[in-house]
Amino acid sequence: MSIVLVVNSGSSSFKYQLLDMKAERVLASGLVERIGEDTGVATHTVRYYAEPGQPVPAVRDSTHQVERPIPDHSAGFAAMLEAFAQHGPLLDENPPVAVGHRVVHGGARFFEATVITDLVEINIDELSVLAPLHNPGAVQGIRAARRAFASVPHVAVFDTAFHQTLPPAAYTYAIDRELAERHRVRRYGFHGTSHAYVSARAAEFLGRDLSDLRQIVFHLGNGASVTAVDGGRSVDTSMGMTPLEGLVMGTRSGDLDPAVLLHLARRADMTTGELDALLNKRSGLLGLAGVADMRDLLTRREAGDEAAALAFDVYIHRLRAYAGAYIAQLGGVDVIAFTAGVGENNALVRAAALETLGFLGVRIDPERNEARERGPRVISADDSTVTVLVVPTNEELEIARQALAAADA
């Protein structure tokens, strides 16, 4: 068996999955949270699969939870190892051959999944200046995991790596060149593992060669981004130097005139820290309507809430603007795919986002769009000039694939 452990670490929590890569299925998953607080929580879920022909559900989950102080990530990994020992699957019988780590920012240094050495760890830590909310937590998780699994190769899989194929015209900001180079100011793009997985899965689902397709992938969750994918290569993407640029998100503003910050600094006496918190935590849908979740927003909109209605319109306006821009950049489009929480589950958002593309022959089939099915599915009409898909993302599987390939290289 080719077992891979995937770890996604934050500053006060980490998620994990143990995957059997021969069958590409999850054996166990978990979440260790509230690290450093008085009481931490460790949740561990074991997934059981029925043997072929057995008259029982194909999948059954068994979840176990403990609460206790978890002072740091090392203690968190100890809690995870205890959960495997007590509830399974036993790691002695399912030893990981690699550990894959999600790392948000690889800067311009890392172009692909990379086996973690001491030097690579130092480089990831140094890149924290570009992702102060994300990379420090990843580094803590990497250090703890390398201690817990000392004999296993560890691989960093970067959210930014898929976007290293962006042409200079797409990643360059029009500011003083020497200043930008000195401080590494450029577009990097994010959600790369999701965009890579979904674009490849879309081609596989359609039975088409990935290299022949011009795709637009909308990753719409609490964080949201859109990427133009030409022949499997990212050629433009909405997030920039940080995950703040681009689409309207749950709590993030997305695109904004930079002079707004100067105006607020001068007129409202806001500090850089306050401006950072405003744009990342108190903007987007939350800032416009008081709720960050699209489901709550639509409930308020249906009840006649004018703020919610405006927030929805702003959200959709931005989706349409990027769709049009990327169709122009690609010189046309063959496939448009929606993924992540909102993209996979909200038919209204999908229909509204593409409603104005009828002049290009883009047609959504209402029944297909409203259907709630698992797995990839076509939601465009038979006479649509563009195939529109819903493709559930699987970032953990993509990380495991890349980690296994890098470890075997």
Image: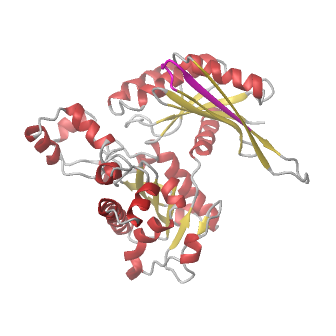
Residue 302 horizontal/vertical position (percent): 41, 66
Q: Residue at x 68, y 22 (%)?
A: 81
The outermost residue toward the left is 267
- In the rendered view, tell whether residue 138 sits above or below residue 252: above
Question: Is 145 on the left or on the right of 356, as rendered?
Answer: right
Question: Is 11 on the left or on the right of 259, as rendered?
Answer: right
Residue 336 horizontal/vertical position (percent): 48, 66
- In the rendered view, tell whether residue 130 sits above or below residue 393: above
Residue 33 horizontal/vertical position (percent): 54, 28
Picture quadrant of residue 178: top left
Q: Residue at x 45, y 59 (%)?
A: 218
Q: Can residue 59 be seen in this view?
A: yes
Picture quadrant of residue 41: top right
Q: Residue at x 61, y 27 (%)?
A: 42
Question: Of residues 153 and 26, which is closer to you in this image?
Answer: 26
Question: Of residues 308 and 368, which is closer to you in this image?
Answer: 308
Residue 69 horizontal/vertical position (percent): 56, 17
Specify start and end residues of the magenta stretch as a single range: 34-46
- In the rendered view, tell whether residue 385 sits above or below residue 128: below
- Quadrant location of the N terminus in the rendered image: top right
- In the rendered view, tell whether residue 160 sits above or below residue 257: above
Q: Which colour scheme is used?
A: secondary structure
Question: Is 88 on the left or on the right of 297, as rendered?
Answer: right
- Quadrant location of the C terminus in the rendered image: top right
Residue 369 falls within the magenta-colored stretch: no
Q: How many marks?
A: 0
Question: Of residues 291 and 242, which is closer to you in this image?
Answer: 291
Q: Is residue 149 visible?
A: no
Question: Is 8 on the left or on the right of 18, as rendered?
Answer: left
